[in-house]
Amino acid sequence: MQRHKLDIAVIGLGTFGFELAVQLSRNGHSVMAIDSDEKKVNAIQDEVAVAITADVTDEDVLRKIEINKFDTVVLAMSSNLEAVILAIALMKKMKVPYIIGKANRFIQRDIFLQIGADEVIMPEVATARRLAERISYPNLLEKFEIDKHHYIVEVRVPERMAGKTLRDLDLRRKHNIIVLMHKTADGMQLLRDADYRFSQGDIILVVGDEEQIKKVFD
């Protein structure tokens, strides 16, 4: 399925903003990278569609680059609180469709949302939580949120399940966990055979309540 191409502006080319802009560009989106530091702009110009040096707290500059025509604008410059606040206010006034802010602290997040940001991310908090979860639950490899409680999770089969079949484990009845797929040399395959016997370290894809999955596969 062809991915929908978006026009995205990434403002602030620190480590986070630089990497985000490059990855979005590699994912097929049209990216304008913006920073007030010419050296950072020069460093990324071969990686994105457009890279410019600009002051995004100047309304005339924002109008000149037609910031309102971008599908999404990411403000990745959370260290300069005043500049982010002004930029969000101006972009909201100019009816930018979707504004994502980056915050270092919860108070910043609350302020950005109050003045009009559509979404605010906190990369350090998110990274810390992911690391804590990876250390605490080493058999949970990857998860994809379905709703507040339910996830599709890629898990490693623990030692105590080795040698047992899907029928033996009866995960659906006992824990309301559905096993969807298992990883083979050819990639993920649907797991249709209830008599499939698991080996320790097998990688499977399951769906269910996140806390139940953690408890069962811990």
Image (cartoon, rainbow, N blue to C red):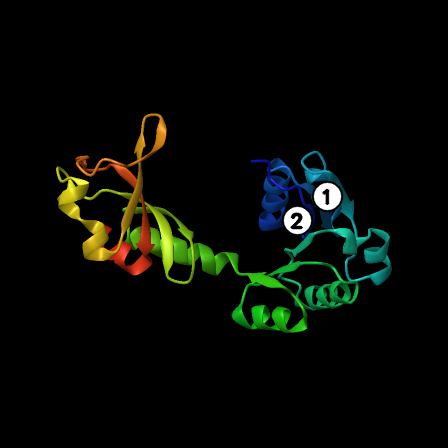
The three-letter amino acid code for the residue at tag 2 is: Leu
**Quarter assignment of residue 89:** bottom right
Specify whether residue 100 is in view. yes
What residue appears at the point 17 percent right and 36 percent down from the top-left corner?
195
Contact, CB < 8 Å: mark 2 with mark 1? yes
Could you say where residue 12 lies in the image, as x and y percent from the top left? 67, 53
What residue appears at the point 78 percent right and 56 percent down from the top-left corner?
68
> Tag on residue 41?
1
Depth order, front residue of 93/212: 212
**Quarter assignment of residue 127:** bottom left
Classify residue 11 as left or right of residue 190.
right
Classify residue 69 as left or right of residue 139.
right
Could you say where residue 15 lies in the image, as x and y percent from the top left? 58, 48
Classify residue 86 as left or right of residue 190.
right
Q: Secondary structure at mark 2?
A: loop
Specify whether residue 218 is in view. no
Report the label total. 2
Work out whether 105 lies above or below 54.
below
> Tag on residue 13?
2
**Quarter assignment of residue 51:** top right
